[in-house]
Each structure stands twice: as structure tokens, then as C-alpha cells.
Image (cartoon, grey):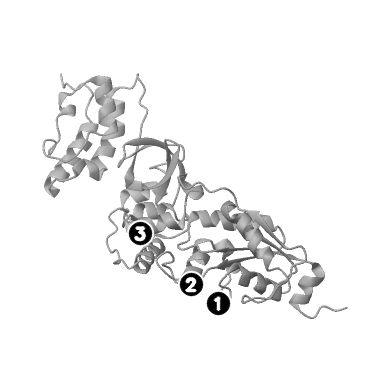
Amino acid sequence: MPINSFSQFLVEEEKTAYFTFGRMNPPTIGHGKLLDKLASSSGRNPYRVFLSQSSDKKNPIPYNSKIKYVRKMFPKHARQVMMNKKVVTPFAALTALYNEGFRSVVMVAGSDRVNEYSKRLNMYNGKKGRHGFYNFKDGIKIVSAGQRDPDAEGAEGASGTKQRKYATDNDFTKFAQGLPNAMSNNDAKKLFNDVRKGLGLKETKEFKNMVQFDSVSPEREAYVEGQLFSEGDEVIIKDTNEVGTITVCGTNYVIVEANGNKTRQWLNAVEKVYDYGTDASVKDIKKKFAPIEANNPAYHKGLAKSTKDKRKAQFAKQAKMADDNPKAYKPAPGDKTAKTKPSKHTKKFKQMFGDNDD
């Protein structure tokens, strides 16, 4: 018998539809993990992603915008993110899949919702209701997407609740850490402000917690060429003084693991730690840390431009001096008034060779 429609094809082939239904308001890297689980569970079977259409303080992103964000944030799943305004509940999603011709279905959900969904969705299997009608021959099977740990870092701990709180607190740095690496900075800022707008808050125009290098800065160019940081480098997170290891080098950021937690850090938010060893000479150390201190904005904070220029010039000059030259250790212009803290390199130097110039 010829197959005259896609629905008939599904019936003849007995394809199983895999799907998920979620708020994703706003979407996070945790939702990306859910979609990956959905895709891997489906194998060669088709899968669908349905999003809720609620709009309130817990759902600040409108439905149409949310669809666009999810598709952009998780491009490999974009074609499976369905825009269907008739699907407002998981029951309606099942009706849509049944009407599409599927007779076998599996839902992927958070571990905390498996039992609830299994009971409620199967309760209406074969029964008409406001949602419509569906009748899957083996009932509705629910598969867990994995355990969630709200206190964990990364995808396991990411949630819409946390993201809404970060937006409320105007903390873009933490908000950005809950977004996938593929998302551009402009899109991240727009999502941040869309969440704030949906929460009834003013748009943020100055992202003080997110300081980035200009695309033509020496630091940016050095990073792109692989001369600034590499995976495995030991670095200090400037805000917290934690020492961690770079696990991922992104486009203009690094992922740093410190004390068991992984965080996204912008290039100028971390400082490389050098292991000079106990046999290192003064000259070797100077060659390594002098250029860093000369070019690091943190070493010139609170100083006039003329003083900054003199300070940079002296750092560069001292780096070339012999290690037995007392002038090599002469204080730089602004040392008494600069709002700085001793760097890791300076601390290491003093630990090995003392504070005195004589």
C-alpha cells in the first residue's frame, strides 16, 4: 500500500517521538544539557522541544523572544525547537505529537519531575480533555535528564531562578557564566536586559562587571595568537585572589577551575602565575614580571596619565638592567600614591630575595 502522507509514514514505520517541555525563562547552560540528553536519547528517532508560554515575574521573557533565544543559544537543536501557540501544556504537546502521526512517545524531564509527569500524563492517555486527545499504545514513558544540584557550579547548578536573581541584582558577570560559550556578548547583554525589563527593572547600559578588551588591544592580540594564556596555565583571579587553573580558552574569556568550582573570567580578570623555582635569578624574574606589571592596568590605578606613562617607561627600563644594579629596584613613579596591591610576582620576588635594596 502506498504511503500518502508523513503521518501515515510515521505510523507505518512506528517511529517514537522524543520531546521535552520546559519554561527555560531565561535559557541557561543547564537547559543545553537537557537538550543534549534529549537528542542522545532519541537516537535516530525525531525529537521536539516545546516551551511554555507563561508570562509573569517568574517568566520575564515573552514566548516569541524565548523561542529565538533558545534557537540561537543552542543552534544544533534549533530546528527541533517548535513554535506552536496551541501547545501551552505538556498535555497539549502530546496532542500535537499524536496529531502529527506518532503512536509511541518518550518525554525527557528533570529528575524531580519524572514521577509527577508519569502519573499525570498517563492519566489522560486515551481520554479527551481541554488539551485535545492522545492515545499512545504503550503510554507515556518519562526519562530523567539527570540529577540537578542547585549548589553546584556550571551546567549542573544553572537555573532560570538563579539567572533571574542575577539580573535583579544587576550582576552581569554571574549571569554571563550561566550562558553557553557560543553566545555573543551583544546577545548576552540583550538577554540580560530583556530579563530585567520583564521583571519591571530598568535597562542596564553600563556593564561594570564585564570589562572587555578592545579588539585591537595588545592583550587581545596576544591572546588570539596564543601568547597570553593556554589551557593548564595557573592564574590568579584578581577579585578573589584565588589561584586556579585554566580549563578552557574561549573567544575573549577563560574558564578557571579554583577550589573545585569553575567560573568564566574575562581576560583582564585573571593574572598568570609563574613558577620561578628556587634557583631563578633576579634577572630571570625581572624579565618575566616587569612587562606584565608595565602593561597591567591594575598597577596604574588612580594615577594621572603622565605618571602612568613614566611608570611604564621605568618598568621597561628596569627590566633591561643588570641584576646587580641598585637602580633596577628603584621605586616607580606613583608607588606611594597608587591604589594598588602587591602583585603575585612582587610577593614572590620579595619572598625569595627580600625587601631591601642593599
- SS of the residue under disc 1: loop
Closer to the chain start, of discs 2 and 3, is: 2
Closer to the chain start, of discs 1 and 3, is: 1
Question: Can you tell which quarter of the image residue 348 is in?
Answer: top left
- SS of the residue under disc 2: helix
Return the residue found at the far bottom.
Answer: 4
Q: Nearer the viewer, residue 270 or 349?
A: 270
Q: What residue is shown with label 3?
A: 167
Alpha carbon distance from label 1 to label 2: 9 Å
Q: State the residue at coordinates (58%, 58%).
A: 35
Which amino acid is tagged 2? Tyr
Q: Is residue 313 left or right of residue 188?
A: left
Q: State the residue at coordinates (39%, 42%).
A: 227
Q: Is residue 299 above or below residue 192?
A: above
Numbered tag placed on residue 85 in the rendering: 1
Check contact, mark 2 vs mark 3: CB within 8 A: no
Numbered tag placed on residue 63 in the rendering: 2
Q: Is residue 104 above or below residue 305?
A: below
Q: State the residue at coordinates (35%, 52%).
A: 173
x, y percentage for residue 296? 26, 43
x, y percentage for residue 254? 42, 46
Crowding near pointer 1: few (<14 within 10 Å), some, many (20+)? Answer: few
Q: Is residue 136 left or right of residue 281?
A: right
Check contact, mark 1 vs mark 2: CB within 8 A: yes
